[in-house]
Amino acid sequence: VLKTPVTITANQVLVPVTFEKGSRQVTATLLLDTGASMTTMDQSLARALGISGGQESAAIVAGGGIVRTRTVTLDRVRVGPKAALKQPVMILAETGPKRRFQGLLGQDFLGRFTYLIDYKNRIIQWAE
């Protein structure tokens, strides 16, 4: 069985995610969010990957507000043994209080795979 260790705190599943663009890669903690249609990353992660451009867009957030974003396509987004190639990711400005995570792992990634969150053992079990 393929497994990825996660942190579960305050009913949030926090997942280590590796982003790759060219020869650069960065690993960050993302919130697993089945309600997010698209994976997001904080601006600081985009800077670490050397990303400065992107297609400007806007996104509707859970409270109904609209935030300005940039969308880029990364070479690879990886969670444990699972990876998505040519993965679009929205870059969000970091605002508000400091959080435990640096973005959202959304359905555009999660929907590609079959998985089970094992809360007791704090892991994601991935289907082969």
Image (tube, helix red, strand yellow):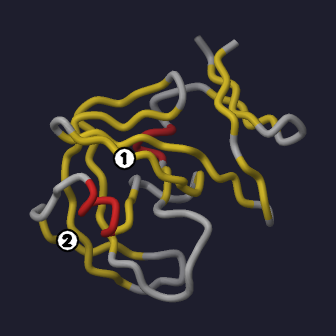
Q: Nearer the viewer, mark 2 or mark 1?
A: 1
Labels 2 and 1: the sequence-earlier one: 1
The amino acid type, in three-letter code, at marker 2 is Ser
Q: Considering the numbered disc 2 on the image, is that residue within a helix, a strand or a loop?
A: strand
Mark 2 highlights which residue?
A: 57
- From the top left corner, tell me how far across and down residue 93 is, in percent: 33, 77
Q: Considering the numbered disc 1 on the image, is that residue within a helix, a strand or a loop?
A: strand
The answer to whether residue 15 is above or below residue 43 is above
The answer to whether residue 59 is above or below residue 6 is below
In the rendered image, the quadrant that contains the C terminus is: top right
* Figure quadrant of residue 80: top right
On screen, residue 4 versus residue 26, left or right, reads right
- From the top left corner, tell me how far across and down residue 104 is, in percent: 49, 58
Question: Observer-nearest residue: 108 or 7?
Answer: 7
The amino acid type, in three-letter code, at marker 1 is Val
How many residues crowd mark 1 within 10 Å: few (<14), some (14–19), many (20+)?
Answer: some
What's the mark number on residue 61? none
Mark 1 highlights which residue?
A: 26
- From the top left corner, tell me how far across and down residue 15 is, in percent: 60, 46
- From the top left corner, tell me how far across and down residue 97 is, in percent: 56, 86
How many residues crowd mark 2 within 10 Å: few (<14), some (14–19), many (20+)?
Answer: few
* Figure quadrant of residue 123: top right
